[in-house]
Amino acid sequence: MQEDESKEINMLSDKDPAAQQLIECSTASQTISEEELQDHMEQFTQIMQHKFLVGEDTEFLDYSKIDNDERLDDHWTREANYDAEEKYFEKD
């Protein structure tokens, strides 16, 4: 698991200065404890979650493609209709 997490940070560090800083900190001593690695991963996760919430992660994902994909709307329209029918028939 540790190796997978390191690969994920390395992949994103090319695009994100905060991730790059975590890499530099973790490689400065060449070996870090499991506790330190976990702390770095938590920091990285918090940074990425914050970027997602404030809309600063557009370099990783083009949300306009999702927003403009009508196929996705079809699914939610069917779900909303189904929920409305269920609610209607539950009243009886």
Image: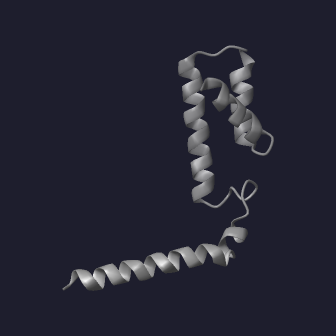
Residue at image point 69% right, 76% down: 68
Q: What kind of colouring is applied to the model shown?
A: one colour
Instruction: Provide residue 52's location: percent of width, then percent of height.
Output: 61, 55
Query: Is 19 drawn above or below residue 73 in the view shown?
Result: above
Res 44 quadrant in image: top right
| Count of numbered badges drawn on the protein | 0
Query: Is 68 drawn above or below residue 22 in the view shown?
Result: below
Res 13 quadrant in image: top right
Residue at image point 69% right, 66% down: 63
The single residue placed furthest to the right in the displayed view is 14
Instruction: Provide residue 57's location: percent of width, then percent of height.
Output: 69, 55
Query: Is 8 drawn above or below residue 60 in the view shown?
Result: above
Instruction: Provide residue 29's location: percent of width, then percent of height.
Output: 71, 14
Frontmost residue, 45 versus 65 = 65
Quadrant where the C terminus is found in the figure: bottom left
Residue at image point 57% right, 78% down: 74
Instruction: Provide residue 41's location: percent of width, then percent of height.
Output: 59, 33
Quadrant where the N terminus is found in the figure: top right
Frontmost residue, 18 versus 5 = 5
Residue at image point 26% right, 84% down: 89
